[in-house]
Every structure is written in C-alpha cells, then in structure tokens.
Image (cartoon, helix red, strand yellow):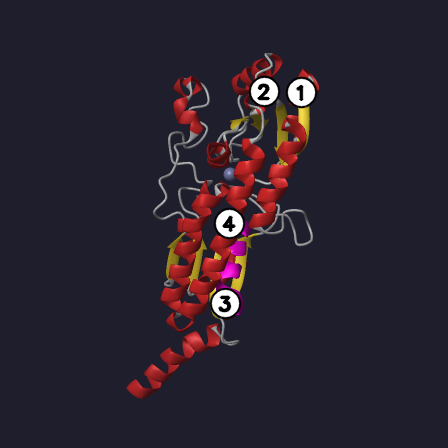
Amino acid sequence: MTGLAAGLLLSVPAIAEADGKLPVVATFSILGDLTQHIGGDAIALTTLVGPDSDAHAFEPTAESQRAVAGARVLVANGLGLEPWLDRLIDASTFKGELVEATTGIEPLASTEAEEPAAEGEGAHDHDHGGPDPHAFQDPKLVLTYIDNIAAGLAKAAPESAGAFRKNAEDLKARFRALDTELSASLGSLPSENKRILTSHDAFQYFGRAYGIDFVAVQGMSTEAEPSAQDLKNIVEQIKGGDIKAIFIENMNDPRFVESLAADTGAVVGGDLHSDALSAPGGPAADLLSLYRYNAAELLKVLK
Ligand SMILES: [Zn+2]
C-alpha cells in the first residue's frame, strides 16, 4: 500500500516531464526570451503573454492555468507588472519555484506619484506611487534578471545548474556589450532633442540609463485611459516645443498618439517596443533586438 502510493507520487513529475525537460512558464514574451536563452534544451517553456500583447491587461485562460499547474518553475517580473498573477497561482495550485526576476533591483517610483496632477484628477485611475515594473528596459538591470532566472532554474534542476550558469554568463556578456553600444550612440544625441512622448510610461529605466526624457500620455499601466486634463497638458507641452517627437508602441492602440500628432503637428517616430517582443521574424523578436530596434527608431528622429 505505501509502496504503491509512493510509486504513484513518484510518477507524477515523470508525466509532467515526459520529454525529460523541465516544464517552465514565463509570464510574458521578454521574460520568455531570457528564460529560453538560459534554460536552452533543458527546459520546455510556455509563455503566457505572447508577442505584441499587453502583459498588464492580460486575462488568464484555462490554458494558462493548466500550464502553470504543470510548471516546476514560474518566471514573473514582479513589481506589479502582472496584477493577475496571484489569482492565477492560487487557481492553479502552483507549488513550484516562483522566480521574481526583479528581486534585488531597487525600483524607480511610478512617475505619476511625482507629478502635481496626482493631487487631483487621475488619482483614482490606477496604482499611483507604486514601483515602476519596467526594469527590463535597462540592460544593466537585465543582468539581475538573468541571474535570478538562472538561480531559479538551477534550484528546480540542479543537474543542469552548470549549463544554466554558462548560458547566463554568455547572455550577460551580450547585454553588457549592448549597454556599451547604446551609451555611445544615444549618448551622442544633442540634449535638447532628448524629450519625447510615448503612449504608456514604460521607458523610465531606459531614459535614466541613456539620458532621454520620456513623457507618457497613459501612465504606468495600460489599464486606464488618459483623462481630458492629461491630454490637455500633453498638447500644451507639444505646442510649447518642449517635446521633440511622439512615438507609439507595438502593443496598444495608437489612436491617442495619432490624434495628438494630428492636432499638434508633432513629428511621429516609429513604434517602440515597450513590454512585448515582436513575433518571430519581426524586428524585435528577442530582447537584444528590441533594444537595438528601439534605439535605431529613436536615433532616426532625434539626431
Ligand atoms: Zn508597461
């Protein structure tokens, strides 16, 4: 009886890992890319929020729940990027290793908290004053993401720890080289050209890293729409000449920004990739390409 029970228990992980790979779930495309590079052939990865899709506003499906239930490792960003995650973890009775990839990163505060507008209108919209979750937009902070993911995978599959560590070090070297490259190219821009507008506030970390001032129409999350007052402020800033150009993003509705541009005559740049990769074959199909693509789009307009 005990022998049989033990045998059944032992067979459970064997079913989940039928192909011998560690089942891993990443919450959105950028984390999926990092996790795949680190895990290599040793993992079977499911990414919940795919390319060109919005991780803030995701609604988990029955399929998401099944993937999380079967996972040994769940890689999440944390800092409030995935407001739906706790409920999904509870619903799927996930018992594996939860990796919060931002662990150890000192987060920036949400920009709204610093602005006078937060006193009145707009303060009800969403979480003001919380941490800014978009730390993956600074290559130096991506190094911490990589370390955290490698450590989490190694805990769940110690036999592959050496391979994870090596893959992680290779990937970190590529992000260090990227940082050097972007510091040189974006660092050479004239300072008066460094104030631009985007649709949602995902580029504070990127802006801090490379000295570019991003102003957002929509705030930190994509869940709330900008108020009439927010839009009026933005139009005044553009008309006052403070803002050099407007960029739209790949994962949300560009109409706000397009109508702003029509109203003000501002220069519109290409679409920046903020919280999502492009589909395979697209210009930002992995995180290194995403950075190079965004930097090229910025340089085209801001030079
Ligand atoms: Zn975002």
Distance in Å between CA atoms under marks 3 and 2? 45 Å
The magenta stretch spans residue 175? no
Label 1: which secondary element? loop
Residue 286 position within the rendered picture, expressed as x and y whole percent measured from the top left: 59, 51
Instruction: Report the residue at 39% width, 23% height from top.
Output: 114
Of marks 3 and 2, the one in the foreground: 2
Instruction: Report the residue at 42% width, 60% height from top.
Output: 150
Of marks 1 and 4, the one in the foreground: 4
Q: Are marks 2 and 1 in contact (CB under 8 Å)?
A: yes
Residue type for callout 4: Phe
Mark earlier in primary sequence (1, 3)? 3
* Residue that label 1 marks: 266
Crowd rating for badge 3 (residues with CA inside 10 Å; few <14, some 14–19, many 20+): many
- Which corner quadrant of the image does residue 299 belong to? top right
Distance in Å between CA atoms under marks 3 and 4? 22 Å
Residue 255 position within the rendered picture, expressed as x and y whole percent measured from the top left: 66, 29
Could you tell me which quadrant the C terminus lies in? top right
Residue type for callout 3: Ile
* Residue that label 3 marks: 43
Give the magenta-colored segment's residue range. Answer: 27-41
Distance in Å between CA atoms under marks 1 and 4? 33 Å
* Residue that label 2 marks: 243
Q: Are marks 1 and 4 in contact (CB under 8 Å)?
A: no
* Residue that label 4 marks: 175
> Along the horizontal axis of the image, is 117 left or right of 269?
left
